[in-house]
Image (cartoon, helix red, strand yellow):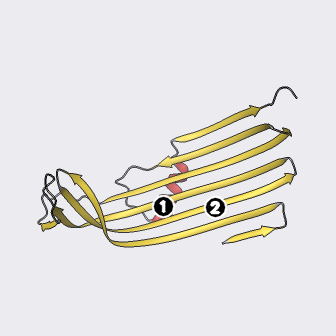
Amino acid sequence: MRYSAGDRFSTDFRLDYTDREALLVHKGDGNYTSFESHQWSARLETNYFICAKQQLRFTMQWTALKAFEDRFWQVNPNSREFLRSVANPDSTPDDFAISRLTFQARYRWEIAPLSDLFVVYTRGSNLPRGNFQSFQELLEQSWNDRIVDTIAIKLRYRLGS
């Protein structure tokens, strides 16, 4: 969904849900596990042009996946053959969850042609794989338990004429 309010403001939002019956993961040495999985992905981008030479941009991207083991497969890694179904090789479940979030706020000021000042704030997270909360709780925890929290300032200035 995209919305623009004139030439100075725009926002773009995308939300996707994917339900897979057989997400196949290689476990090594010819062993595979297929998972039933559920995934939410969201992306939000907002741009505001303060004037012709100044811009604010906010972006956020989040992906969360929950996968539950379903079936087990094996193949000879030294020959070309089809996967064959096998019994569960152990009693430990291979279920996993992933939640990754990136947020960025950026200010850009064009001082002169080919000369800019950028101020960028970045925040990101990558939750441990054993976290089976609701998707809403995964999003909240991804925002709160950040592993990246930085501010960068860059000045690009063209010397000469």
> Looking at the image, which residue is at 54% across and 41% down?
148
Q: Residue at x 81, y 30 (%)?
A: 158
What percent of the width, then of the height, locates residue 154? 72, 34
Q: Counting other residues with Cα less than 10 Å from the Cα at mark 2, is it few (<14), some (14-19), or many (20 or more)? A: some
Query: Can you say whether 11 is above or below 21 in the image?
Result: above
Mark 1 neighbour class, 10 Å CA radius: few under 14, some 14 to 19, many 20 or more = few
Count of numbered tags: 2
Kind of residue at disc 2 = Leu
Give the image quarter of residue 130: bottom left
SS at badge 2: strand
- Residue 157's label in the rendered image is none
**Kind of residue sitting beneath label 1:** Glu
Mark 2 / mark 1, whichever is N-terminal: 2
Picture quarter with the N terminus: bottom right
Q: Position of residue 40 (x, y in %)?
A: 48, 66
Q: Secondary structure at mark 1?
A: helix
Residue 70 position by quadrant = bottom left
Task: Give the Cα separation between the discs numbered 2 and 1.
Answer: 19 Å
Give x and y (percent) for residue 20. Answer: 36, 72
Residue 32 placement, left or right of 153: left
Residue 125 drawn at (x, y percent): 50, 48
- The residue pinned by badge 1 equals 137
Residue at image location 46% in from the left, 65% down from the top: 135
Instruction: Please give the label number shown on residue 44.
Output: 2
The label nearer to you, 2 versus 1, is 2
